Amino acid sequence: MAAMLAAFGGLTGCSELEGLTPPPLPSGRADSDAGPDGSMGFPDSGIGGTRLTVARVEPGHGPFTGGNSALVRGTGFTAEAIVTVGGRMVQPADTERIDGNRLAIVLPAGEPGPADVSVQQPGAEATLPDGYVYDQAFIEPDRGSTSGGTYVTLTGSGTAFAEGDRVLFGEEECTDVEVVSETRITCDSPAGTVGAVDVRIVSGEDGSEIVIEDGFEYFESSDPFEGGLGGGPIEGTINVSVIDATTGAPVPEAFVVLGEDLSTEHQGLTNLMGQIAFSGPDVAPPATIHAAKFCYEKTSFVAFDARDVTIFLVPWQDPMCGEGSGELPPGRGRSGSFVSGELVFLGPNELGPNPWDIIPPAREGWRRVSYVQTTQPCPGDDRFCLNPDPSLGGGQPRVLEEPLGERGYPYRIFVRPSAFAVYALGGLENETTGEFIPYVMGVARNVLAGPGEEVTGVEIIMNIPLDHYLDVQLDGIPGPGRNGPDRFVVNADIDLGGEGVIVRRSEGDLVDEVRRRSTDRPFRFFAQPALLGSLSDGRYRVQASWVTGDFDADPSTHVVREGIRRVDSEVVVDGFLGVPVATAPAFGERMPSDRVLRWETDGGVEPDLHLVLMVGGDGNPAWRMFVPGSQQFAPIPDLSSIPEIDDISSGFVTWVVYAISIPGFDFDEVSYGDLGDDDWDAWALDIFTAQR
């Protein structure tokens, strides 16, 4: 999904898999008192000297999973600075020297609690004891409207959330609290005032609290970081801000118009701050705003009732615009990590290896084998979710009954630096076909690996029999689209909260995926574990997809169900959205004369949001439209009469319609953060062509 949005000029990050290499940790630690000179200076200004010091980290706390940005303040920083937090290195590629007094970093994962922050560079080292605190829990999203109602998820590490626990934003109670597992709670934020508030999780059993300081920020207008709509209902005025989606800088002289009538007085160019406002008795809901500038994708917010609009215009990566040419500047490296240890099978030998008796004896042509891997940061085969190849750098993820270790059978795998669980699947493998039948599983929880680090001695106890099943029955399937879908794909994974998702694989192939042409009987997943012991806080996550062709192409419709705990039972998955079918223009036809795109569906649940993306005949992103889920049309006015703004490039135009369902969604508060499919519980899409 992220790849699809990126292809249409989406706002997506870069995969951490790219450029992962396993170099050693930096060595040669210097005396902390040694510096370029003997002066102290002023930590925040650098006045008076260049001696290496670390004064503070802003913000001073963050999630145990890492991945958040912070600023290290001090003196004497050079371009060679290496930062460690809690003994774990910050990726050099994630360390940017702003000046001699500031380093911008992306935090590695860490154990909850205080952590030392150190900066090392040639000839010097400085440490700030307990300079950063890893919170035991974090909240997503961490911002929302003052009106409340933002659907949030709180994820903990080593927590024991239970029914009766309360969640408070400041002194106000979160509503619709649902304890999903011992490490995850969801709820709807209460109303609040502008600014940050502490978020407290209060135990219903003993009143103990987990506090996330300044954990949630209320805003009154549209989201200052993720843009979109906000600020409350329209009362005669709409304020528009236009931002460059790549640089975050204001876009001056962008053309903005209210509605499609180019003779209206409610149009104009943004000022130097990228802002423009429209006022008058006729400025009323439902309103539609269009924004355009040469060498940018046009953007529209359609039929909304919100007085603040923040638009992120996506620049074209086109040489004629001064973009997309030349070589990338050289950057610093990105390191992977290793985890090593032994698979321990239970048996009579307490101090030595035991036989694999929990797995049946191998018949002729078969062998006993185990595969070791880590949880993924997100489910699926998207490149943003996939782990690196565990055999990189001499890794040994495939374990046989020989050789022996001290207590078990040794393994070593290459991993993504993060917080995760390490698990192994043991079973029988056909030596000819590679077919793998799992019989047992083991999990090692709460493993943290920093860049360039090898975490050793991680024992995986192989004591979870895979003798259960999970049945998934699909219901409420809508009608098909223009040329599909024609087959079903259902996946069942185990969500471990902040440690990621167990997506079981054998030599890269998904173990828990069932494919069929019909829904006449349940989709059965064999060899499942009971969610007990080391998996007691886990929950099954089922994704059911109706796709087209052998490559799972579009048209397609998808549903996700989370929080499933019971095995040996049937789960009904419904709530499919209808597949969009283009009606104006119909597939391959010319753009309609009224300049309105239209589509329809055959059944399915009504979505919350439509996202329409268009690519012009020149291959550049042409338009991005946010449309309410109740509406199946979107205007695309001809803006070519505006100086320096071209119409959609002629030729064959590609456009895609996403129908999206998001828990707790309010279209009048839609943001660009809603384009990330992590929070979608259903979506459908198809891609069309037209002529212009």
Image (cartoon, helix red, strand yellow):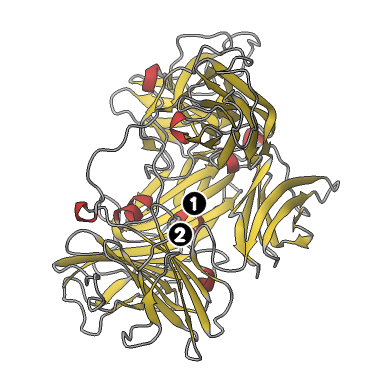
Q: Is residue 624 left or right of residue 200?
A: left
Front residue of 273 and 437: 273
Which amino acid does the dot numbered 1 rest on?
A: Val
Can residue 552 be seen at all in this image of the molecule? Answer: yes
Q: Nearer the viewer, residue 254 or 430?
A: 254
390 horizontally vs 83: left or right:
left
Q: Residues within 10 Å of mark 2 (few under 14, many from 20)?
A: many
Which one is in front, 67 or 555?
67
Quadrant assignment, res 388 = top left
Please tell me whether mark 2 sits on a helix, a strand or a loop: strand
Residue 299: quarter of image? bottom left
Lateral position of residue 61 relative to residue 222, left or right: right
Where residue 429 appears, as percent x and y from the top left, is 38, 25
- Image height check: is 148 above or below 205? below
| Number of the label disc, if any, that sits on residue 44 | none
Q: CA distance from mark 2 to mark 1?
A: 8 Å
**Which amino acid lies under the numbered mark 2 shown in the image of this protein?**
Val
**Circle 2/circle 1 CB separation < 8 Å:** no
Reading the image, the residue beneath label 2 is 559
Most extreme residue toward the front, as rendered? Answer: 48
Q: Residue at x 37, y 77 (%)?
A: 268
Report the residue at 45% width, 22% height from top. Answer: 413
Measuring from the top left, give residue 563's x and y in whole percent. Answer: 59, 52
Residue at mark 1: 542
Q: Position of residue 108 (x, y in %)?
A: 55, 33
Q: Quadrant of the C terminus?
A: bottom left
Q: Residue furthest left?
A: 651
